[in-house]
Image: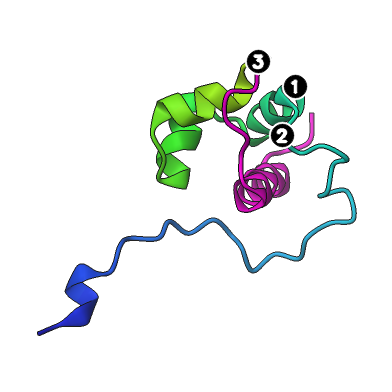
């Protein structure tokens, strides 16, 4: 049996980039900061969910002020990397 046939697809998020010194917030689950990361990455909640392999509702919960669901640190890092990739490829205004 071919094991690779059953391995999930992992999206390429540029995780080989070094983590910047600004990558850790005092409270990474704070909804305004999640929304800021989405904006800096140029992603809607739906697009972010697709890139992270999540249900759109999960990302929506992360962005709500009542904080129903807290994002895992790895999701924060992935969003930071996506924002950094966008910054690197977008022309300066």
Residue 80 in view, yes or no = yes
SS under mark 3: loop
Residue 92 position in % (x across, y down): 78, 36
Label 2 with label 1: CB-CB less than 8 Å = no
Question: Residue 6 lies in what quarter of the image?
Answer: bottom left
Is residue 12 placed above or below 4 in the rendered structure?
Answer: above
Residue 26 position in % (x across, y down): 88, 40
Q: In this view, does 23 lie to the left or right of 45?
A: right
Residue 68 position in % (x across, y down): 58, 23
Residue 86 position in % (x across, y down): 65, 43
Q: Earlier in the sequence, mark 1 or mark 3?
A: 1
Does 70 appear in magenta? yes
Does 86 appear in magenta? yes
From the viewer's side, name the closer residue of 80 and 73. Answer: 73
Which residue is labeled 1 in the image? 32
Q: Residue furthest left?
A: 1
Looking at the image, which residue is at 55% across and 30% down? Answer: 43
Q: Main secondary structure of the magenta part?
A: helix
Viewport quadrant of the N terminus? bottom left
Range of magenta residues: 66-93
Label 1 – label 3 distance at C-alpha: 11 Å
Q: Earlier in the sequence, mark 2 or mark 3?
A: 2
Label 2 – label 3 distance at C-alpha: 11 Å
Which residue is labeled 3 in the image? 66
Question: Residue 38 lies in what quarter of the image?
Answer: top right
Label 1 with label 3: CB-CB less than 8 Å = no
Residue 44 in view, yes or no = no
Q: Which mark is residue 29?
A: 2
């Amino acid at each position: 049996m071919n094991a690779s046939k059953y391995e999930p697809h992992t999206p390429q998020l540029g995780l080989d980039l070094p983590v910047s010194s600004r990558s850790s917030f005092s409270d990474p689950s704070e909804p305004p900061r999640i929304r800021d990361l989405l904006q800096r990455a140029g992603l809607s909640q739906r697009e972010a969910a697709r890139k992270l392999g999540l249900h759109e509702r999960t990302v929506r919960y992360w962005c709500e002020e009542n904080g129903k669901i807290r994002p895992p640190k790895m999701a924060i890092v992935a969003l930071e990397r996506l924002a950094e990739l966008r910054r690197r490829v977008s022309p300066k205004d």
